[in-house]
Amino acid sequence: MRRRIRPIPNYMIANAAREFPVARQPGAARGNMEAMFSLIREVYAQADAAFAEARHGEVRRQKMAEIAAKCLEQFQQHSGIGIVLTIAPTWKEQAFSPMVKVQLKHILQEALANVQRHAAATRVAVSLAVEDTYTHICIEDDGCGFCLSRVLLQFLRPSFPRHGLPTMRDRARAVGGTFRIESSPGHGTRIVVRVPLSGSR
């Protein structure tokens, strides 16, 4: 049975940096402050890149379904892993702003990259749907899965790398969405991103 978890907020790094001096651990505080400033720099860099791509990139001219299909085609060519793309009848292309398309594109690319690097999967299923006032994108693989409780402990570390799951979560939040992951050893991994449609936020 898969367990669900949401990553620990990044403010815990800042909180740890604040508390360590009180505990007379200046070395630990210094390390946490460096991690926090590194995080801030990376978040700003990601935001600048996303705005630039939304303003000037070809994503403005493409439909989200086309972007997803291209990402999956490239992934299959490089990985050899089987792909299934399902587009629900409720899908509404006109609902997406360039920024939403940019962030969803990068979430999909990162999720697929994680599958290729870590999952040992033979098949990936991606579905696009609109339910109520939300866009739903689901990426599911039949790979090895992983222990979410261990990932939770890693998120508490200031040295946790700023890529993969935290970046996907931050990209979803940047456009008012949510990011959920379900996984357990031997049962694959499922990622669900929900983003409000234009005008529904």
Image (cartoon, helix red, strand yellow):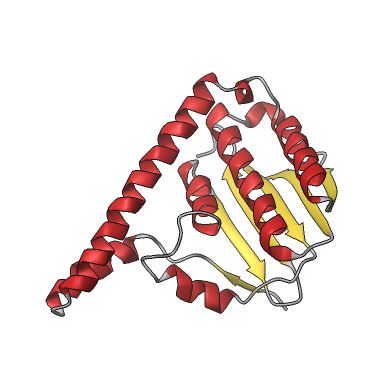
Which residue is at a point 20% across and 72% down the rendered structure image? 27
x then y, percent, for residue 148:
58, 74
State the image quarter where residue 34 is shown. Answer: bottom left
The answer to whether any part of residue 69 appears in the image is: yes
x then y, percent, for residue 83:
84, 49
The quadrant the N terminus occupies is bottom right
Q: Looking at the picture, does residue 61 appear above or below residue 115?
A: above
x then y, percent, for residue 15:
26, 66
Residue situated in front as seen by the camera: 61 or 87: 61
x then y, percent, for residue 75:
75, 44
- Please give left or right for residue 49 compared with residue 77 in the image: left
State the image quarter where residue 106 is shown. Answer: top right
- Please give left or right for residue 182 compared with residue 20 in the image: right
- Please give left or right for residue 24 compared with residue 126 in the image: left
Q: Looking at the picture, does residue 147 appear above or below residue 166?
A: below
Which residue is at a point 78% across and 50% down the rendered structure image? 79
Which residue is at a point 62% across and 77% down the rendered structure image? 147
Q: Looking at the picture, does residue 126 appear above or below residue 7?
A: above
